[in-house]
Image (tube, helix red, strand yellow):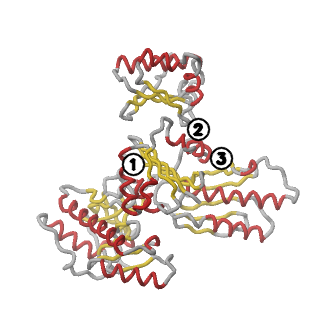
Amino acid sequence: MTSELIIDAQPKQVTIALMEDQRLVEFQREDQESKFAVGNIYAARVKKIMPALNACFVEVGHEREAFLHYQDLGEQFLSIEKYVKQVVSDRKRMASMDKMKRQAALPKEGEIQSVLELGQEVMVQITKEPISTKGPRLTGEISFPGRYLVLIPFDDKVSVSSKIKSSEERARLKQLIQSIKPRNFGVIVRTVAEGKRVAELDRELTILLDNWKQSLTRMQQATELPALVHEETGRTVSLLRDLFNPSYESIHVNDPAVYQEVKKYVALIAPERENIVKLYKGNVPIFDNFNVTKQMKSGFGRTVSFKKGAYLIIEHTEALHVVDVNSGNRNRGVEGQEANAFEVNMGAAEELARQLRLRDMGGIIVVDFIDMDTAEHRQKLYEHMTELMKPDRARHNILPLSKFGLMQITRQRVRPAMDVNVEEKCPTCMGKGTIKSSFLFTDTLEGKIDYITNRLGVKKLRLYVHPYVAAYIFSGFISLYRRWQMKYGFGLRIIPSQQLGFLEYQFVDRQGNEINMTEEIESK
């Protein structure tokens, strides 16, 4: 299996698509202004103590206060708390961790009010992004993840991933890390560290230690709380960190700054693979060029079709996701209803496993498969679903089919499920139900081009339109496009975009900023 990463970096958001064998399997979109990302560390203040919940609420700058449970404080919370107090009390010099005496481990059974008090300054890390009406979820167990290692201050243990089966390799890695890690730091060795040399691991450990020191410096210098003291790497780099493997054929990026960031990271973790990072310079939008847009529009939405007319209906409620499997207009096979139901269900399992990753669906997922009478078929479906879910990085648990034909799945949820609206609204009637003649659409576009070039003084601009509209503009011996260029300047470029509806359009200046020329509602 080969993998390709397509990165669409825009001024307001970055969108990342992971393709496996030319098939879209993961899709992540993050606003550039978004700051409440998993892994971010804050110097914050306790806002409320809730003894009944054995938890507290912490102010981290979100509109809703973040939640911190006693069980999430971590065993080393008392050590971190004492060290943080020393750091904050003396802003001129940094207290040495090597000489710091570790405190007793926090009891597993305890009360939040015996550890924290109202207004206390704490160092916390986000483990779940804000979802729906809930604020971020926090932990007091600070960690710095890298590609090969995870650094944990004040843990002082070295753990090796259980997925590394060789006892000799486990012993080698444990002994190696013990010899290079500083005192009062714990390290988790990740699966991808298997077979790596000491120089590679030592280089990453140095980077993680620097991140910890910089976090303390920012906390020491913070003049008001809450303060962001460590920001998780950008979405692009964090996805690369978790997913990068030798099967990557290429990583395509359409923005020079993000291209340099990705290239620098790949050169750091896999110098021999640096050349797979490529800067996309085509005129067509990057997602259109790599067939992401079409797969995105067919893969999202309430109804998702798969093999031979069968389809899934996916509903999202506050409590859970519900998936209904339908055979659609399939003809019954010669072997009867049971064989037909089994075939549809096996195909539905494949599409469902893809949809869970694609939409990043989390929490409880209930799947209503087509009823099957044979116990052997039900068991095969369960085993097939279990096998299909193995590549999924999110922690999950799958239960066998119940007597009602329902399969229950739980999947780790750390951020809201990806929801892409694939329906196209009418860009001209504004809900009235009637529109101007479509023959006048190009006249409307020309009027806006005239306004932008002659009134606003923008001489270089791109106009994105639906591919059908672009084809009409480019058609003819002396095309409409050529006439516009002669009239308004050769800085005008027309670019077809599959992401736009039939009569939608978008003007963008040379810096990539959108020029808002939305049609206003006409007064009656």
Q: Secondary structure at mark 2?
A: loop
Residue 512, above or below 200: above
> In the figure, residue 337 lies in which quadrant?
bottom right
Of residues 478 and 11, the one drawn nearer to the viewer in this rendering: 478
Residue to which mark 1 is pinned = 259
Q: Position of residue 510 (x, y in %)?
A: 37, 31
Q: Residue 423 bears which disc, if any?
A: 2
Label 3 or label 1, whichever comes before in sequence order? 1
The amino acid marked with disc number 1 is Tyr
Residue 268 visible somewhere in the drawing: yes
Give 254 or 338, whichever is nearer the viewer. Answer: 254
Three-letter amino acid code at disc 2? Glu
Q: Residues within 10 Å of mark 1 (few under 14, many from 20)?
A: many
Badge 3 element: strand
Q: Quadrant of the N terminus?
A: bottom right
Type of amino acid at the residue the image marks with label 3: Thr
